[in-house]
Amino acid sequence: MVTEKNVLEFGKLCDDIFTQLRRDVIGQTEVVEGTVIAMIAGGNVLLEGVPGVGKTRLVRSLGRVFNMPFSRIQFTPDLMPADVTGTNIIVKDEHGNSKFEFQPGPVFSNIILADEINRATPKTQSALLEAMQEHTVTVMGVSRKMNEPFFVLATQNPIEQDGTYPLPEAQMDRFMFKLIVPNPGLDELMQIVNMTQATMAEVAEPVCSGAQLLEMRKTANGIPVADDVMRYAMTLCAATHPTGECASEAAKKYVRLGASPRAGQALISAAKVKALMKGRFNVAYSDVNELAVSVLRHRMKMNFEAISERISADDVVKMIIAEVGKRYKLTPAQGVTEYVLSTEETPTVSSAESDADEDGKKKKFKWRKDKKNKSAEPEEVKTDTSAEAEAAAEVRTDDAMQQAAEQEPAVESAAETEGQAAEESKPKTGRKGKK
């Protein structure tokens, strides 16, 4: 049972942890808080950001603050699975006989920094799957248990950058959080430069041991969750499925595959830690809403419509929170606000304008042939239906008839001339011929 003493000790340790981390990491408050929450809850964290924003420094500082064995694995395209998990090697015993001996890899530690994890091939990435979920490593048919507590804190560059491989869905699902590390602001950048001019090394001091961290996790697991809050959290996860019974309109339109049951487990475990950090003995709706984006953003697969409209997973999660929040009648104080996409509006023509165009001059198009390009081009011709146009048409008709009448005598005279010429060309027979 959780007592007030446990909660006070929990809060004091959290304050000490954040105080030491701020000595090494400038800004990035949400990223630091999310990483600590995941470590206390027993989950793995994926940090995504461009190079140079402090992802590796944050993980190295966490290794110093929690005073636990720390290993760093630099993932490269030529890294092999055995380089991560370890392998059996042939050694000589005291009698000179050869035997196989297991040489543990860097994964056998408490805190694992998988630096630039998406720069390795999928085969090497999958070497961490068993360790991340079951906390065991199997090599040559022998399973070996990891030391507790065990965490994988991975960093990756955006997939648009060169030399990156997308992480498989099975591995993405094993990360409790996916945290986006933004670029620092101007003031933060000035503080970073001033701090690194003094020293580039981490200066954080150990304030929490592995045993204390396990005790904090035990305290967080004892926090109660009301049935309504639990149902709300599970509804958020189920609403990401476009074909489920709780499917949201956003999921039906933009999502191809929704979140797995691991999302529900991660959401509740993290919400308990979040409540304790705020000094509360119970999980609130606001705790769930604040963590939903970090838990769900990497567990959904967007469809073609979302990609073509540039709708991100974060946008979809926020729309789902707003939609489900309306069902539960939550207020903005509980972390639910109306979410509207910022899209550019296309100009439309009103019905009044279209009617005015129809009542005005009618336009027809006829095609004329361009002699040079031999291509048909539309030519706009205005047709006037007034009385003047009708009179002009009658005048043109009379002129055409008069011209035709004038041409008829000329045709007849031409025919008579041709007949006379034909008669003259015939041979003449005189009287001498008859004699």
Image (cartoon, rainbow, N blue to C red):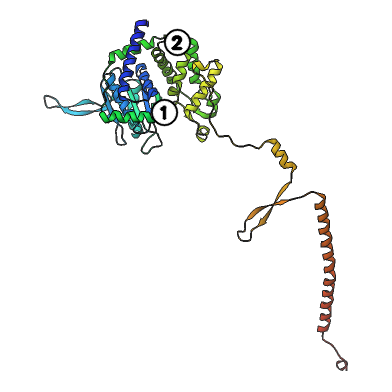
Report whether residue 323 is seen.
Answer: yes
Q: Quadrant of the C terminus?
A: bottom right
Residue corresponding to mark 2:
225
Query: Where's residue 337, x and y in %?
Result: 52, 21
The numbered disc on residue 95 is: none
Report whether residue 246 is seen.
Answer: no
- Estimate how packed mark 2 is, as few (under 14), some (14 to 19) or many (20 or more) residues with alpha carbons within 10 Å: some
**Which one is earlier in the sequence, the residue at label 1 or at label 2?**
1
Query: Where's residue 411, x and y in %?
Result: 82, 71
Seen from the viewer's position, the closer of residues 150 and 181 is: 181
Residue corresponding to mark 1:
169
Vertical comparison of 151 with 121: above or below: above
Q: In this image, 351 relative to 322: left or right?
A: right
**Which residue corresponds to the image point at 52% horizontal and 17% vertical from the top-left?**
332
Q: In this image, 362 relative to 281: left or right?
A: right
Q: In this image, 89 relative to 424: left or right?
A: left
Nearer to us of marks 1 and 2 is 2
Q: In this image, 344 relative to 186: left or right?
A: right
Vertical comparison of 394 with 222: above or below: below
Seen from the viewer's position, the closer of residues 434 and 362 is: 362
Query: Where's residue 227, x and y in %?
Result: 48, 10
* Badge 2 amino acid: Val
Seen from the viewer's position, the closer of residues 212 and 53 is: 53
**Which residue corresponds to the image point at 83% horizontal and 65% vertical from the top-left?**
404
SS class, disc 1: helix
| Residue 194 found in image quarter | top left
SS class, disc 2: loop
Query: Where's residue 145, x and y in %?
Result: 28, 19
* Badge 1 amino acid: Glu
- Estimate how packed mark 1 is, as few (under 14), some (14 to 19) or many (20 or more) residues with alpha carbons within 10 Å: few
